[in-house]
Image: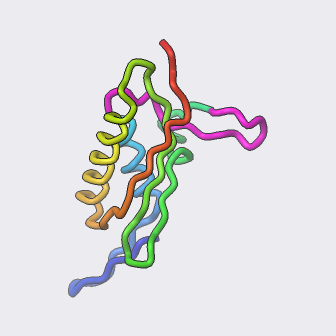
Amino acid sequence: MITQTNEQGTITISKDVFTTLAGEAATNCFGVKGMVVRSAADGLLHLLRREAMGKGVLVRQNDDDTVSIELHIAVDRDVNISTLCESIQTEVRYKVESASGVTVSGVDVYVDSMIIG
């Protein structure tokens, strides 16, 4: 939970909100196939459906009331990974900050898989 207090009162935002915002912003970027998670049972990567994409997003609240976001994604084969990741970082930061008013201190993108076809 992220809590913000101002002269009008207190606002509490669940980490699930940040997870949803970040996941949607990332998966809407061209070249992203989806969020992925490594299975504890078999160690394999699994592409997540839209309902479960939160498993591929980790949100941490920092001591200075900012958030850090970690994304695990699968990408298309024919994309420039560096450019795509920069685009994702910009888009996720913008969407989360504009929707929540909370500063995003960092967006780390991990390309865990490349989908061919």
Judging depth in this view, the residue of 110 and 7 nearest the camera is 110
Vertically, is 110 above or below 58?
Answer: above
* Residue lying farthest to the top in this orientation: 117
**Residue 105 vs residue 70: left or right?**
left
Vertically, is 8 above or below 112?
Answer: below
Indicate yes or no whether the magenta region holds residue 41: yes
Judging depth in this view, the residue of 111 and 28 nearest the camera is 111
- For the magenta stretch, what is the residue range? 28-45
* Residue lying farthest to the right in this orientation: 41
Judging depth in this view, the residue of 16 and 28 nearest the camera is 28
Q: How many marks?
A: 0
Quarter location, residue 66:
bottom left
Residue at left offset 55%, top offset 30%: 113
**Residue 72 vs residue 66: left or right?**
right
Residue at left offset 37%, top offset 24%: 79
Q: Residue 51, percent across and down?
A: 50, 39
Q: Residue 93, percent across and down?
A: 30, 53
